[in-house]
Amino acid sequence: MALTEKETLNSPIQQLKHPLLAERNVRLWVKRDDLIHPIISGNKWRKLKYLLEDARQQGCHEVVTFGGAWSNHLLATAAACAVSGFRSTGYVRGELPENPNLSLCSLFGMNLLETSRSDYKDKTALYNRLHGKDREAYFIDEGGRSEQAVAGCAEMIGELERGFDHIFCAAGTGTTLAGLARGLQQANLNTRLHGVPVLAGGFMSEELKGLGADPRKVILHEDYHFGGYAKAPTALLSFIAEFVRDTGMLIEPVYTGKLFYAIFDLIKRGYFPEKEEILAIHTGGLFGILGKLENLRPYLNTRS
Ligand SMILES: *Cc1c(COP(=O)(O)O)cnc(C)c1O
């Protein structure tokens, strides 16, 4: 089955109930892209659909891509390739640890290869060296970063049946954010678009430019990366534990935990005028929580 066969993903939009929202009189809605598919979840389906379509049109049979040991992109790509009949190879940054994420990648048939950190820095060179002559191979950059992925993510805006004052999204490569910016522009909407970068370094506006989005149209909240990618300090973990308990909606420490932390913190600081309506994109990736369960343990509600 090709991912493009699902004509519209139309993930549901649900209103979140929480005492803070009632107290501050703001409304928070969540677009549940995490419900699109258990593994090819959230933005990953949107990012991969036109890439795999392109691979098929070019007559390729194998997808070659890249990611860290806990990469949601690797897992989603492994599953998407299995679903659509491609072979897949994943270059993992650094050594190949045994972890549930990589085991699941293997289960979906992905051929995993370890890569030295220096080789990993120049993925295009690595690909050209090892697969450049193979006409059946198709390159997908880390995180799916590409024009095709931006186009797939832009379609999210067309699924909205009503307006919002704000849209919030977590940003890794910024591809999803760039897609949302494009979708808003195409639909001529002046909804304010917010990005929460999960990596430290403040390079998101450059990334957005590289992906064809105007960074001036995106409000970046650069102070919620919690020290960088996959860092999970106490404040974040205790927020997540409470949030999941209070709302019944699962989030994880790498992306959506930081996203909702940022939204709640901004609400507490009075950033939003009363009655404003916020839409948060739940970009899925819930298996990421498996890598952090040990860290979460001290914050779990143990009833004695
Ligand atoms: C991959 C991923 C992201 C990052 O998306 P980008 O398009 O790279 O910014 C955000 N959230 C989740 C849950 C992800 O798995």
Image (cartoon, rainbow, N blue to C red):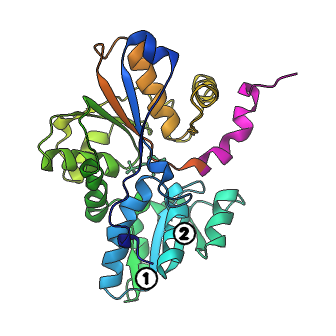
Ligand 1 within 8 Å of the CB at mark 1 = no
Tell me if 237 is positioned left or right of 216 in this view: right
- Residue 137 in percent (x, y) is at 41, 83
Residue interval drawn in magenta: 287-304
> In percent of the image, x 38 and y 58: which residue is there?
9
- Residue 18 in percent (x, y) is at 51, 21
Tell me if 89 is positioned left or right of 178 in this view: right
Question: Which label lies toward us, 1 or 2?
Answer: 2
Disc sitting over residue 131 in the figure: 1
- Residue 82 in percent (x, y) is at 54, 76
Image quadrant where one finds the C terminus = top right
Q: Secondary structure at mark 2?
A: helix
Considering only order in the chain, which callout, 2 or 1, is on the residue closer to the N terminus? 2
* Residue sticking out furthest to the left: 188
Is residue 201 in sight in this rendering? no
Q: CA distance from mark 1 to mark 2?
A: 21 Å
* Placement of 63 over or under 47, stated as above or below: below
> In percent of the image, x 37 and y 13: which residue is there?
25
Is residue 65 in sight in this rendering? yes
Near-viewer residue (250 or 88): 250
Q: Amino acid at mark 1?
A: His
Q: Amino acid at mark 2?
A: Ala
